[in-house]
Image (tube, rainbow, N blue to C red):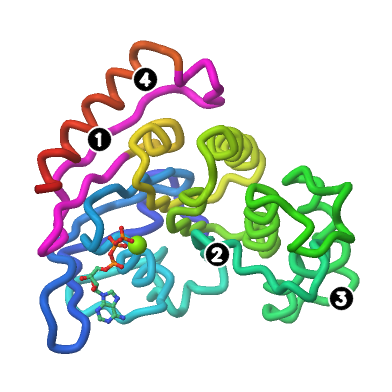
Amino acid sequence: MDRPNNTPLVTLRNLHKQYGGGETVLKDINLAVNQGEFIGLIGPSGCGKSTLLKMIAGLTPVTGGILDIAGKTPSDARDRMSFIFQEATLLPWLTVHKNIQTTMRLHRVDKQECLRVADKMATLVGLENVKGFYPRQLSGGMQMRVSIARALSISPQILLLDEPFGALDEMTRDHLNEELLRIRSIEAWTAFFVTHSVSEAVFLSTEIIVLTANPGTIYKKIAVDFPYPRTAKTRESPEFQRLVGEVSHHLRSVDR
Ligand SMILES: Nc1ncnc2c1ncn2[C@@H]1O[C@H](COP(=O)(O)OP(=O)(O)OP(=O)(O)O)[C@@H](O)[C@H]1O
Ligand SMILES: [Mg+2]
C-alpha cells in the first residue's frame, strides 16, 4: 500500500451511507488523505463518525460513491488496518503480554515473532514492567496503552481510533496524546481519529474534519499546521488557543 507522495492513500468520493432502508447517515463525503496524515473527525453525536471509520475498516458496507484505499476496497485492505475503540476491550484472563499478542495470533503470526513483537510493543508504550499483569491490575490509561500496543503489533498502515481516550481524565488523556505522537514519529501510520474534544483534535491532527448531522456531511476542513513534535508547550501557545476557538465555533454552528 505504499504510495508515491502525490497519490492519496485513502480516497472518499461522494461517499454515501444508509443502514438498511433507513435515513441517510452520511452524504457526499469527499476526502483525499495522503500517507502519514492524521485526520481528526469531530461533529455532533450521531452524525456518523463511527460509521465512517467502520466503512474505511470494511466493517460495514458503503452504500454509494467510492472508497478507495491504495487501489483496494476496504475489505481487501483490512490486513493493514487496526481499530482502537473507546473501551480497551482486553481479555481479562490474559496477561498484558498475551493481550498484546491476540491480534497477531489472529493474523497467524509465528509464535516466536509474536513474543518478540509483544516485547517490543510493551516497551514502546511504556508497559515493559507490567507485562505479567492482568487487565484488572491496570489503570484505565494503562489498559488503553495495551490496546494501542495490540493495534500497532501488526504494523498497520492505517490506524482508526474511535474516541480512544474519551473515558480517561484530562491529564491522562493529554499524556497519551503526547505518547501517541511520539509513537507516530517512529511508526508513521496514517490516522483517522474520532473525538469530542476540540483541543485533542487540534493537538493531534494534520487536518480536522467538522461534520454536520442528519445527514452527516463535511461542514469544514481545517488544516493544522503546527510542526511536529508537538509537546505540552504547543497547547499553551496563543496560536493553539486561537485554533481551538475557531474549531469550537464551527462545532457550535453544526451542533444545533
Ligand atoms: N448498525 C446500525 N444499524 C442502523 N443504524 C445505525 C447502525 N449504526 C449506527 N446507526 C445510526 O447511524 C447514525 C450515526 O451513528 P454513528 O454511531 O456513526 O454516530 P457517531 O457520530 O459515531 O455518534 P457518537 O458521537 O454518539 O459516537 C445514528 O443515527 C445511528 O443510529
Ligand atoms: Mg461514535
- The residue that label 2 is drawn on is 82
Give amino acid for label 3: Lys
Disc number lying in front (4 or 2) = 4
Q: What stretch is highlighted in magenta?
A: 208-235
Q: Is residue 208 above or below residue 152?
A: above
Q: In this view, does 109 lie above or below 230?
A: below
Mark carried by residue 109:
none
For the residues labelled 4 and 1, say whether their Cβ atoms are less than 8 Å apart. no
Give amino acid for label 1: Ile
- The residue that label 1 is drawn on is 222
Q: In this view, does 126 lie above or below 16?
A: above
Q: Crowdedness of circle 1 by 10 Å Cα count: few (<14), some, many (20+)?
A: some
Q: Is mark 3 within 8 Å of ligand 2?
A: no
Spatial separation of the CA atoms under disc 4 and disc 1: 13 Å
Disc number lying in front (3 or 4) = 4
The percent position of residue 212, horizontal first and vertical second, equals 14, 53
Q: Crowdedness of circle 4 by 10 Å Cα count: few (<14), some, many (20+)?
A: some
Give amino acid for label 4: Phe
- Helix, strand, or loop for circle 4? helix
| First along the sequence among labels 3 and 4 | 3
For the residues labelled 4 and 2, say whether their Cβ atoms are less than 8 Å apart. no
Q: Which of 248 and 33 is in front in this view?
A: 248
Please tell me whether residue 213 belongs to the stretch shown in magenta. Answer: yes
Q: Is 32 situated left or right of 173 in this image?
A: left
| Residue furthest bottom as drawn | 20
